[in-house]
Amino acid sequence: MSSYNITSLNDFIIRKQKDFPYAKGELTSLLHHIGTAAKMVNSKVNKAGLVEILGESGTLNVQNEEQQKLDKYADEVFIDALLASGECCGFASEENQNEIVFTETFAKNSNYVVCMDPLDGSSNIDVNVSVGSIFSIFRRTSPRGSEVTLSDFLQEGSRQVAAGYVIYGSSTMLVYTTGRGVNGFTLDPSIGEFCLSHPDITSPKRGKQYSVNEGNYLKFPEGVKKYIKYCQEIDKSTERPYTSRYVGSLVSDIHRNMLRGGIFMYPSSESYPQGKLRLVYECNPIAFIVEQAGGMASNGRSRILDIIPDALHQRTSFYAGSEDMVARLEGMLR
Ligand code: AHM
Ligand code: MG
């Protein structure tokens, strides 16, 4: 008897397609290509200390931040994979000022746009801290057959068709949702497949961990300071003080809090009056996943997924994680 009992990412997305009787396999193909590109990025990230891929590329991205060589590599791999899928008509990412319009006829006839942070947390990569890729998929609003326009990318997060992240960590995982729960797949390097390892991820309603860059404490809004103090108070009945855990790599901080229960905070501050994280390709996809796992994601006043973006690189304050914790913080911010 063999021990063949795996469900690969590809098996899983094909099986899920059958839940939608009229699905034509377009999204299935798109997700499959994202998975393949993630394996290519993973292979480079794994070798980061060995090959000439570490360090700054000598160019700045649209936010005037130093691009790492790996940022650019990941961006190019995902662009090529999405184009090759034949199901993507345009792409937007942290690395490009404007949306990229795929002009090939087959691409113009396709239905989906993808927004990505191809390699989030890359400023950590030289010191071997986990980094991630984040993706968000929308159905286009412009007619098929035409070139996509900026408005195709500026849809509110609640209209996402699918979203996910890849975490290049002690093992590599791909976690995604199509709006029917969240599933996680771990890359088995010996067979080169993402295998279902975390079916139906649900976040505990409350947790015991809070994640924030506390070095900025004095610059935070009063409500956030109050909530941090609440996390630090001693109260056995509510299992406080909570533990402080901050990697400084969004995907890692969110992944841990989602599995164990906790809250992630990146507030506005004097240095980042609008918040640091980007709505379209960082907060929206993470918010969709967090909500699908039973958690909450907010800018402190309203639901992240209800915000209509007005620019590709728009920033927002971001609070996400276990429902009770985010709700309490929102109360303190009011
Ligand atoms: P990046 O997109 O330039 O990599 O920045 C985003 C990262 C997130 O992964 C992380 O949550 C945050 O920046 C950390 O910021 P800070 O170092 O200010 O705490
Ligand atoms: Mg980023």
Image (tube, rainbow, N blue to C red):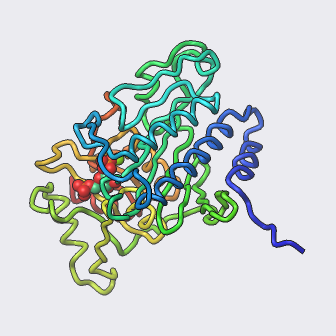
Outermost residue, bottom side: 236
Quadrant of residue 153 within the rendered picture: top left
Query: Is residue 318 in view from this perspective?
Result: no
* 2 shown above or below 329: below
Q: Where does residue 47 sit, x and y in percent of width and height?
A: 47, 59
Outermost residue, top side: 146
Question: Where's the N terminus, which quadrant?
Answer: bottom right
The structure residue drawn at horizontal position 45% and vertical position 71%, both measured from the top left corner, is: 260
The structure residue drawn at horizontal position 52% and vertical position 21%, both measured from the top left corner, is: 102
* 34 shown above or below 174: above
Outermost residue, right side: 1
The structure residue drawn at horizontal position 14% and vertical position 62%, both measured from the top left corner, is: 217
The structure residue drawn at horizontal position 28% and vertical position 33%, both measured from the top left corner, is: 62
Q: Where does residue 297 sit, x and y in percent of width and height?
A: 38, 52
Q: Where does residue 162 sit, x and y in percent of width and height?
A: 56, 42
Q: Where does residue 286 sit, x and y in percent of width and height?
A: 43, 50
